[in-house]
Image (cartoon, rainbow, N blue to C red):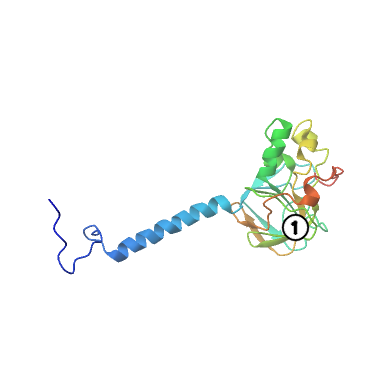
Amino acid sequence: MTSPDPSPGSSSTAPTAPGSTTSDAAATATATATDADADADATTVPRVTELWVAPERHAPMEPRRRVEVEAGAGVVGDRWHGTRHRHVTLQSADALLEAAEALGAPVPASATRRTVTVSHGVVPTDPGARLRVGGVELEVVRVAAPCALMERSMGPGGAAALRRRGGSVLRALSSGPIAVGDPVEGLLTAPTPSRGAGPARRPDPSTP
């Protein structure tokens, strides 16, 4: 037995739920797509995951949810505030995982004594490279080479494990806040050829 043909003028489109309209369905679809885009953004855009400062050299690192950066001076309240170039240090959680594998033990972000840790990506080390963290523009000065203090904060072998994985030293080109969750622009997706397999650098005496 065959189904009767639809009556003239009828539509083959499935009916909407009682009380809803086509515009309601479209709005729901748009909202779902927006939520999906937001979820994708959260996993693909590098973001600040940790912030650490020390009020003076060799002092214990202190966690922060938000810091203030001053152009030409650095992070307010940090030991390097007011220095010529060492305004912010930035590292990637990806590099910390690699360091932990090399060390054979976890490497907490605070153990490296860097200011900013980002969720993923490769931190550029070529001088002059630009990054934007939240609304603050930063410029790479040099690679942040590990120092002898890593042997205490990370354990024996810490400095070697962090070599070429310690991120970069940056100068602040603009002022503003940096907060946990802020997006980061300017990271690389793979190591730069000139830095990825280069010779080991001398320890950085200014890290503490």
Q: What residue is rendered at 31% in x and 66% in y?
A: 23
- Percent across and percent down for residue 133 are 66, 58
Q: Nearer the viewer, residue 180 or 90?
A: 90
Hey, what amino acid is under mark 1?
Gly
In the image, taking residue 114 as reference, residue 202 lies left or right, namely right
Question: Which residue position holds label 1?
Answer: 74
- Percent across and percent down for residue 123 are 71, 51
Q: What residue is rendered at 82% in x and 41% in y?
A: 147
Q: What residue is rendered at 77% in x and 35% in y?
A: 158
- Percent across and percent down for residue 140 are 77, 57
Q: Quadrant of residue 83?
A: bottom right
In the image, taking residue 58 as reference, residue 106 lies left or right, namely left
Question: Considering only vertical position in the picture, is 42 above or below 95?
Answer: below
Question: Considering only vertical position in the picture, is 101 above or below 129?
Answer: above
Q: What residue is rendered at 67% in x and 39% in y?
A: 97
User: Which type of secondary structure does the marked residue at label 1 adopt?
Assistant: strand
Q: Nearer the viewer, residue 65 or 97?
A: 97
In the image, taking residue 207 as reference, residue 20 lies left or right, namely left
